Image (cartoon, rainbow, N blue to C red):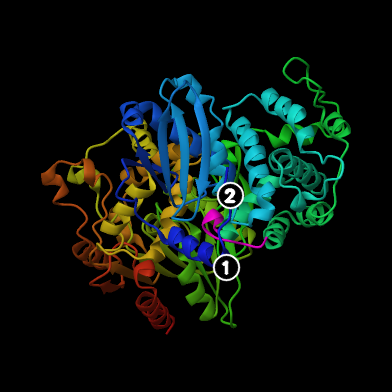
Amino acid sequence: MRAAALGLSMLAAAAAGAAHASTCPSATSETLAVRGSTLCLSLDDSAAARRELVHAWVERSAGIVADYYGRFPAALVVIELRTIDGGGVGGGRTTNDAGLIIHVNVGRDATAAALADDWVLVHEMVHLALPEVGRRHNWLAEGLAVYVEGVARAQSGNRAIADVWAEDRHSMPMGLPRAGEGGMDQTPGWGRTYWGGALFCLQAEVAIRRQTANRVGLQTALRAILKETGGYAFDRDIEDVFRIGDAATGTRVLQDLYAGAKNTAQIPDLDALFSELGVPKDPKTEAFDDRAPLAAIRIAITAAVDPAAAAELPDFDYPYPVKRFEFRSQRQALHMAYMDVAPKQEGGRTAVLLHGKNFCAATWLSTIDALTAAGYRVVAPDQIGFCKSTKPEHYQYSFQELARNTHALLSSLGLGRVTLIGHSTGGMLAVRYALMYPAQIERLVLVDPLGLEDWKAKGVPSISLDDWYARELQTSAQSIRDYERATYYAGHWSEDYEPWVQMLAQLNSGPGKELVAWNSAAIYDMIYTQPIVYELGNLSVPTVLMIGDKDTTAIGKDFSPPAVRALLGHYPELGKSAARRIPHARLIEFPDFGHAPQIQDPVAFHKALLQALKGIAH
């Protein structure tokens, strides 16, 4: 249940405070990190005594909602749990007048099974995803919470699909208007608010899927609404909300449904709708009809999330249109996502950007803009195993294989000689590509490349793929943020870096996290075992090294003995040594930058980059 709407001026002030809250209030008992968000738990003594049960319940509920929306709907929310008599979960309420707060009553005798079967906390968390639309439209907030709770739990396997449809079939008639009642905005009774709102959602779901050949549904619209509006911390006109949702699905379903239902009582034929969906009168005891006209839509609504699709950053937008290169490698069909950005002025050259291990093509944003402004066509791919590209169940990773994949992509685009720019692990790949295809390289730029030292030879212990996998499964937004602050940005932090943290957090905590972690483990093993330092002297193309002198990156440094750790990641020396090995290389050092100078100070970095490229050209 959402609290009654405040006056608009008060709401705007409250929402602004909630939207910018970044720390838990002092009364918080403890915090949980879920999918990059912070959940501030306020527990009374009884709830605190059952901490393990409570944590599992809260994390499971938050994960269900995050899976449905592609992320948890709020960066920070307070969850106040109050113990009551009984063995279940009591009522809940979500408010936004003093920050985002969910209030829930929990029975002191609630068991793990009872909490696993709970719907209340999921229902309340769904409220966080819709902006404040005003008291007159409370039917939308409550209807969505009712509808999404069932669908999201079914998608995650937390609730039986038959149980969801049985409840809808039994309860949605309570949402139909009674004699003399008006439209949805005019009839605030309990049945119309909760089940009338849920019926509106089901009608929208079916209509969207019919109009899009079952390609997308209401979930797509709701994700877009959350992304565009920011959720319950902000207020938004309901018609604006529906326009955003319709734009995401390419339809006018939400706007048209609302136009018809807001002031006029609508009485859809529920029996006919459920019959077309193949829903029997008692789904708990009767079989679904999979031959019904809309059976495919019914199945799609509650279908489990595909881990492979979830592992490809579906809810993180890139700055330019993403294309896919389909090809075969190692007896399997794969695809590489890439951006191909036209120059802003005619220059006649193409730059190819190769990202690092904890980076994606999108993190090249400022470099793409700088190069296209200078007349370069820019191609920025996500390598196999990364970001929006395929994460194979099994793949023999080597820099040679990644170079072949990249060469196939560039050949498919009809590209000849290119300027190749590689950062971090992408620098290792760029070196391998230049060694394998020197005739294709006009100029080579290596930005803080890894592999300038042989970590294995220096004493970094080997760990198994299983160990790498276990480590990767522990990745969180906070661990990413802490590592990047120390290593990539020389101890500094800016909110400009946060989108890249959230990007990685989505990959590493979503439904496809196991697939992401396994590929990441194999990639780390590739990096560890295939240094480039021994072959730098074989490069035959004009090369620029760009080194942040405060970079300390070294694979395995954190689990190396102290004496070995002291030998690793000294980039001022590594950069100079590499420049001596590479024939006629030019070294550019940034004394105050860490591992990602192109992100830490884009202006200074790109000025140096463009000057260096002009110098090579002449």
Observer able to see residue 355: no
Q: Quadrant of residue 445?
A: bottom left
Is 118 above or below relative to 419?
Answer: above
Q: Amino acid at mark 1?
A: Gly
Q: Which mark is residue 502?
A: none
Pointers 2 and 1 in contact (C-beta within 8 Å):
no
> With 397 as the anchor, is 31 left or right in this view?
left
Q: CA distance from mark 2 to mark 1?
A: 31 Å
> With 85 as the anchor, is 52 left or right in this view?
left
Observer able to see residue 451: yes
Would you call the spot at circle 2 few (<14 residues within 10 Å), some (14-19), or many (20 or more)? few
Q: Which mark is residue 416?
A: 1
Magenta-highlighted residues:
230-237
Q: Percent position (x, y) of residue 199?
A: 76, 40
Q: Amino acid at mark 2?
A: Pro
Is residue 236 covered in magenta?
A: yes
Would you call the spot at circle 1 few (<14 residues within 10 Å), some (14-19), or many (20 or more)? few
Is 8 above or below relative to 56?
Answer: below
Is residue 603 covered in magenta?
A: no
Q: Percent position (x, y) of residue 177?
A: 82, 41
Q: Which mark is residue 314?
A: 2
